[in-house]
Amino acid sequence: MPDPRESRRPDTDVDILILGGGLAGLTLAMQLRLQQPERSVAVLERRPHPVREAAHKVGESTVEIGAHYFSEVLGLREHLETQQVRKYGLRYFFSDRRRDVEACNEMGVSRLLPTPSWQLDRGRFENHLGERALELGADFRHGAVVRGIELSEDGGAHVVSFDHEGARHALRARWVVDAAGRAGLVKRKLGLAQANDHDVNAVWWRVDGHIDLDAWSDRGNWPTRFQPAERWKSTNHMCGPGYWFWLIPLASDSHSLGIVCDAKMHPLETMNTHDKAMDWVRRHQPRAAQALEKPEHKLQDFLFLRHFSHGCKQVYSGQRWALTGEAGVFLDPFYSPGSDFIAISNTYIAELVRLDFAGEPVAPYAEIFQQLYFSFYANTLTLYQDQYPVFGHPQVMPVKILWDYAYYWSLLAPLYFSGRQATLPVLAKLRPHFDAGRALNLAMQALLRDWGLRDRSPPLDGARAYDQYSVEWCRRLNGQLTDVLDDEAYLARTHRDVDGMRQLAAEVLALVRAAFPDIDDHGLDALLAGHDTAAHAPMLPQHWFAPAAQALDTAEADA
């Protein structure tokens, strides 16, 4: 007997039509075909394929959620291991206007943490995604230009018209997903654009060859302090007041470079051409400029973007449309969360499609998933918003980075790795932990900002090597992401990890108060009421703040 639900569905050419065949669109097509092979999927992409390697796009650095999505959910581990660069973590240098990098504080890992991530050559990766999407049965039409979108409001088929191979075409689809990046086709049609208060700009470019940071100095302990790590494989952040400058290696023997800055402290007009950007780098990061001026590092491209961070009024609809990737929301690249939010959004969309074809009413789920997604966006935005003025602080930033990792590895990353981001009964039980973590994070970000703005003391004696690998709980939180737990064990672990966040917050508050007894606690005292610091193992590495000789001895013992 035919399913009566099928008779209520409109005639369509395709079940899901994805507008945009970049990173977000192609990965969604693959995810749908892998998880729901009975569903038909089409993708319309404006650019002809194959695209050139080292493509003119940002979003080359992955962190744990996005890396897990690509490698395990989409089954791309072999490609990542053989055709991309295995990443040596995020690395930070507090080196504004300094040529003597060996005398600057540095934070990173000396050894790889357990959960892997990669640097993506976006051109190479998107070419591979296009090939895999076709192999999985998606109808991938590149060189297709969308000309019109008619969204049904009465349960009928959505209709998209487009030009492809010299002719006008139209497709009727049950679902339409806007993955068109900043072009935002559905977003513009429905007026969903929404600004936020994170006023930051970026310029970026690519050059030929790889830039070997390990060769930048042979003085002091620069050659040995992070061995056996290879610095050039990290996402390197050269930090200063109001900005950071990235260096990311690509597998096509290219290097990606970019300046991201607070618009008020470093106006875009001072860096919106390559010549201006290089003048800026010469002033703020002279050792990097010296490396870039070698003739083998020929310029490949240059682009800039004003006020790149944005929100969105709506990303999921009960009327069977959705937005994903940069067509929806975009945060800030400092901790490389772009592919994380693609993974999270695509997974919600795939679940909405599954529920719809199972005959479930989609609108209530779309509203719940959107609330969750927007809460992840808003909470993560607090790591960046109003924080750029302290990005160059050599004592505050290592503490902030530790805190931000603890927040990410304790809550959002485990939720995605465990496959529970759309499991409503578990999410209801998790809510008190997420609420507690959110409150702690809001207070901590305000405290860290105040500390950084007030502290004008000279740097600690000697160049500091802040090795995250030497911090036991960093290794543990990162390593346990791949643990397979039942609901009870997962909830218990989340409770323990949020309690660890309380411990870290209490120790940071004590550290700051020792220097500034009158500093505003921003509500931390109330949030930490009843927490017994003495009953917990210390979280803040004390050797990071000890005299230089003692710090080195303790760090070597820990490692």
Image (cartoon, rainbow, N blue to C red):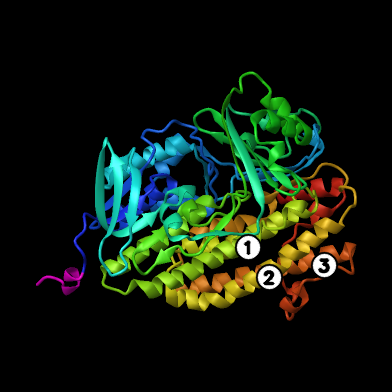
| Disc on res. 440 | 2
Q: CA distance from mark 3 to mark 2?
A: 15 Å
Which residue is under mark 3?
510
Compared with residue 510, is residue 29 higher up or lower down, i.e. above or below? above
Q: CA distance from mark 2 to mark 1?
A: 9 Å
> What amino acid is labelled 2 in the image?
Leu
In this view, which residue lies farthest toward the left? 1
Compared with residue 158, is residue 301 higher up or lower down, i.e. above or below? above
Is mark 2 in CB contact (under 8 Å) with mark 1? yes
Q: Is residue 3 magenta?
A: yes
For mark 2, does the 10 Å Cα neighbourhood hold few (<14), some (14 to 19), or many (20 or more) residues? many
Residue 330 located left or right of residue 505: left
Magenta-drawn segment: 1-8
SS for callout 2: helix
**Residue toward you, 402 or 424:** 424
Residue 4 located left or right of residue 46: left
